[in-house]
């Protein structure tokens, strides 16, 4: 059996930081409300000149450096993003050109906050089929560009960033399994209007901002993530106690705590970045993974449970032996 093994991780955050106090001067909110309901204190936001591909490139170079692999050796690039620089070419194709990664297949996967897990799941299938030996998988988003900065229900929640992993074929696990799901019937609870113009000369459908019924999304997220924990452990014939680290999507500390409770895990076995980064959409899981690898919490041989939930609705998980 061929497994994709994580050979390197990387991340990138915009320099500009926006605190809760700054947001409370723009909309009717308070630092206390944001912290209590979400766990967020600050988030990184791109400036006018920065793009999703800029963040993706920095994270990718970090990951390639830590893996000691040259971009020219990559067989596959998959980028999870909902905020591509352009409708086309894909962010992955732009990234491939910037990295000088030859002619390997490169494409984006759009699954909003589950984008990285989806991208990892797709890459995993290429490894299993024996068609690639080295892949770059990125989660990158500039979700701040999809926000109505006068809507307090959404503008306090998101941040920008990118995270990346380099995968290498190995006989030993590796990414042991990935689990991907979607239910498009939930669109009314979380969406961004706009997109490809329907009529000649029209640039957008108008109102291209995140619209969310937060408390309804919250309930489904908690329920769904609890279910996927069971599915992931059962598929690998493992129990809760086999998992060393939970590396969850960082939307809300209360959702993270609910999943940790389901796993019976103390919070010191959970990687949490939401406080300083907010919800960075597809970037949040690989950003958390990279932080924990770099500060030495995650050690070789340990079992990691990665999970995410987002617009679509989409949700997914990966069980990884690091
Ligand atoms: O990652 C993709 C998936 N997204 C998520 O997972 C997000 C899931 N949802 C959440 O994280 C939470 O539902 C939120 C953080 C978005 C909201 O927290 P909540 O505890 O569910 O609050 P709520 O939506 O029920 O709103 C409670 C009150 C409302 O006021 P009324 O109607 O009770 O008077 C809101 O208008 O809080 C008000 N509110 C705010 N107040 C101060 C909403 N946003 C704010 C705000 N500051 N920023």
Image (cartoon, rainbow, N blue to C red):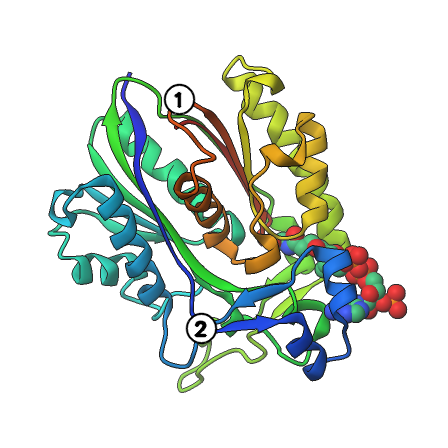
Residue on which disc 1 sits: 301
Q: Secondary structure at mark 2?
A: loop
Report x, y in % for residue 13. Answer: 42, 62
Using residue 294 as the reference point, say whether residue 240 is left or right of it. right
Residue in front for this viewpoint, 49 or 85: 49
Q: Position of residue 29 (x, y in %)?
A: 76, 74
Question: What residue lies at 34% left-to-right and 54% top-to-bottom?
Answer: 108
Q: Is mark 2 within 8 Å of ligand 1?
A: no
User: Mark 2 packing: few (<14 Cα in 10 Å), some, or many (20+)?
Assistant: many
Position of 247 compared to 64: left or right? right
Looking at the image, residue 289 sits to the left or right of residue 252; the answer is left
Quadrant housing residue 46: bottom left
- Front residue (pair 87, 246): 246
38 or 74: which is nearer to us? 38
Screen quadrant of the N terminus: top left
Q: Which residue is mark 2?
A: 46
- Above or below residue 57? Residue 152 is below
Pointers 1 and 2 in contact (C-beta within 8 Å) = no
Q: Residue at x 35, y 25 (%)?
A: 174
- Image point (55%, 23%), residue name: 243
Give the residue furthest to the front. Answer: 295
Q: Is residue 99 above or below residue 171?
A: below
Res. 280 mark: none
Circle 1 residues within 10 Å: few <14, some 14–19, many ≥20? few
Q: How far apart are the two marked residues, 1 and 2, measured between alpha carbons?
A: 36 Å
Residue 233, x across and y down, in percent:
56, 20
Instruction: Locate ligand 1 by image quadrant.
Output: bottom right
Quadrant where the image shows the C terminus: top left
Residue 237 lies, with reference to residue 165, above or below; the image says above
């Amino acid at each position: 059996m061929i497994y994709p093994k994580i050979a390197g991780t990387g991340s990138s955050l915009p320099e500009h930081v926006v605190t809760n106090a700054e947001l409370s001067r723009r909309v009717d909110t308070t630092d206390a409300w944001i912290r209590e309901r979400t766990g967020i204190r600050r988030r990184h936001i791109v400036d006018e000149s920065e793009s999703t591909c800029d963040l993706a490139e920095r994270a990718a170079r970090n990951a390639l450096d830590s893996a000691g692999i040259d971009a020219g050796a990559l067989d596959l690039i998959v980028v999870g993003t909902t905020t591509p620089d352009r409708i086309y070419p894909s962010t992955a194709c732009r990234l491939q050109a910037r990295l000088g990664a030859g002619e390997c297949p490169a494409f984006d996967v759009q699954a909003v906050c589950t984008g990285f897990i989806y991208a990892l799941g797709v890459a995993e299938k290429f490894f299993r089929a024996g068609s690639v030996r080295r892949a770059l998988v990125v989660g990158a988003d500039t979700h701040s560009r999809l926000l109505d900065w006068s809507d307090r229900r959404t503008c306090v929640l998101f941040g920008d960033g990118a995270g990346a992993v380099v995968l290498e074929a190995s006989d030993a696990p590796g990414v042991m399994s990935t689990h991907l799901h979607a239910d498009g019937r939930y669109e009314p609870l979380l969406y961004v209007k706009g997109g490809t113009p329907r009529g000649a000369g029209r640039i957008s459908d108008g109102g291209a901002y995140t619209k969310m019924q937060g408390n309804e999304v919250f309930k489904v997220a908690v329920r769904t993530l609890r279910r996927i924990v069971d599915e992931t452990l059962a598929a690998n014939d493992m129990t809760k106690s086999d998992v060393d680290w939970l590396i969850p999507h960082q939307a809300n500390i209360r959702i993270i705590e609910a999943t940790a409770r389901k796993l019976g895990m103390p919070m010191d076995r959970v990687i949490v970045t939401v406080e300083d980064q907010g919800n960075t959409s597809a970037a949040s899981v690989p950003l958390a993974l990279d932080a924990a690898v770099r500060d030495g919490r995650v050690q070789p041989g340990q079992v990691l449970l990665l999970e995410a939930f987002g617009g679509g609705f989409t949700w997914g998980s990966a069980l990884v032996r690091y």
